[in-house]
Amino acid sequence: MSRSTLRLTVAQALVRFLSAQYTERDGVRHRLIAGTWGIFGHGNVAGLGQALLEAGEEAMPFHQGRNEQAMVHAAVGHARQLNRLSAQAVTTSIGPGATNLVTGAALATVNRLPVLLLPGDYFATRVADPLLQQLEHPVEADLSVNDTLRPVSRWFDRVHRPEALIPSALNAMRVLADPVDTGAVTLALPQDVQAEAYDWPEEFFADRVWHVRRPAPEPAELAAAVEAVRGSRRPLLVAGGGVHHSEAEEALRAFADATGIPVASTQAGKGSLRYDHPADVGGIGHTGTAVADGLARTADLVIGVGTRYSDFTTASGTLFQEPDVRFLNLNVAAFDAHKLSARTLVADARAGLEALTGALAGHRVDEAYEAEYREGKERWEAVVDAAYRADDEHAVPTQTQVLGALDAVVGDEDVVINAAGSLPGDLHKLWRARGPRQYHLEYGYSCMGYEIPAGIGVQQAAPGVPVWSLVGDGTYLMMPTEIVTAVQEGLPVNLVLLQNHGYASIGGLSETVGGERFGTAYRYRAPDGSFTGAPLPVDLAANAASLGMDVLRARTVRELRDALAAARASDRPTCVYVETDPTPTAPGAEAWWDVPVAEVASREAATRARAQYDRQAAGRRRHL
């Protein structure tokens, strides 16, 4: 019996296939590829461009971007908001469009967030060779610029023949839906192959559901984990982004309620517990709170849940100082579970926490330990209050007072987005997260320019939810172009734009490592050639307005609070622009971060910084 086929181009077949893919977890189904972002050029306009047009918006919604990197950021924001259960695709032409994907792909893969990349490629038939924008290599004829995406992709394939699309597309979906292996997935599509017709088996286009697993812990690992917890005097749980991806927030709350074990959070894990939960001690590591870092230094058991233990979390190997400290890692990825020579609990975060809570029935930390960290939490809340407080409402606000004004305006359901600059440190220490999705920090790659496009992706994933993209002037200048997309799509993303005339975060770091803030200020050159003259006369508010945003200028704390409230009530993309007082009002770092300093130097600042570096580096440990 002959099987039924459909004659379609490769691009048409791919779009039809993608429209029929779904994820399912806990009985809830999501569309796996919820839409496609695209900028068209000669490498994809006649292939995927025509296929998307023919498919229509119902089968595959299309979103017009302005910058290829930004399109990936938008897709990543969308995926994170939906706990990795839904993704978006991004198509570009061959050449600069394709290479512009690399930064976004790296961000997605570093943060373990799914995005499908569909760049155009050279002619598979080589009838036109070299093409416009084709990279020629003297000894590798099959190399193209898309090969730059290989090291930053979790799956990569170049589809040279129509029939090769079938296994390649299936593998792409497998990786996108896999909680362990997910990240950027690249299908490089030669432009002649995109337009080539083929007789496709109809079953290729049938609805396909990819089950997202919740693996339970093995009994032996669970028993060892329970023994470790019961045997500890000062346990500390570190909640990472895996708690959110697994939707394990309620399971974590139940664990903390039952055991009294305090919970600190990484940047990705913040909001796993509400800030006012008695066991929540805030951020941990270089940008952590005094109470969390104090507990980390004396913990005899550190329970990592869904964290990959970046250098910010471990304070570059200096944070966990108890001589006999041991680690227990609950992670769906064995690669992360084995870090720091830990006992492992390789399982889904929610399933693992539920199993631990049940197996630890009746166990609770000592009352004195609970009293200690709750008193520390109370002291830290007073620090937050002081940083947020503005005694003079007619004064120019500091950066932490901006956060205080925003804290007074947002609701529990709002989403606050940031990625780079000095804001991540202030937010990790000070932000009072009220819901599991409110705190959206991309700090795995800490990519300047992420915030505005990510806000669009979040808004697409959560229509009706107020979204706030927080950026400094340095980040804004990196990638403001997707403001036009927000205006075009009618997405009421709120942009809070802080003008501080330079790279404030790196300026501060430069000063501590002997760099004397070299090259970090946005100022005219002085007569000696340094960038220490007057501030540049740029008007970023006017720029945002020129791109179509409503703009509210706030000069004082009171005007800022009013502007934020007006922005939240608006149904249009709105920018709240504020020039901040540079006076430091955030608490200092409670833990170290290893940024190597020049071992020899002629300038005194660098010599002093190296002496300080050597003192701090002496505290590094390898946990074996």
Image (spheres, rainbow, N blue to C red):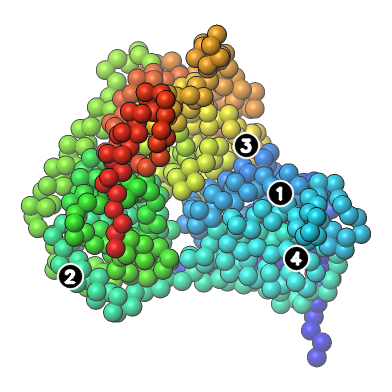
Q: Residue at x 63, y 49 (%)?
A: 102
Q: Secondary structure at mark 3?
A: loop
Question: How crowded is the residue under tag 1: few (<14 C-alpha within 10 Å), some, or many (20+)?
Answer: many
Q: Which residue is mark 2?
A: 361
- Cα separation, mark 3 vs mark 1, equals 18 Å
Q: Residue 162 is drawn in which quadrant?
A: bottom right
Of circles 2 and 4, the one toward us is 4
Which residue is found at the position 69% from the left and 61% from the top?
187
Q: Secondary structure at mark 2?
A: loop
> What's the CA distance linking mark 2 and mark 3?
51 Å
Whole-angstrom CA distance, mark 1 to mark 4, is 16 Å
Q: Earlier in the sequence, mark 4 or mark 3?
A: 4
Q: Residue 71 has which mark? A: none
Which residue is outermost to the top? 527
User: What residue did someone put label 4 on?
Assistant: 159
Q: Is residue 493 left or right of residue 276?
A: right
What residue did someone put label 1 on? 98
> N-terminal of the two: label 2 or label 4?
4
Upstream in the sequence, badge 3 or badge 1?
1
Which residue is painted at 32% across and 55% down in the image? Answer: 239
Report the amino acid beneath label 2: Ala
Residue type at numbered disc 4: Val
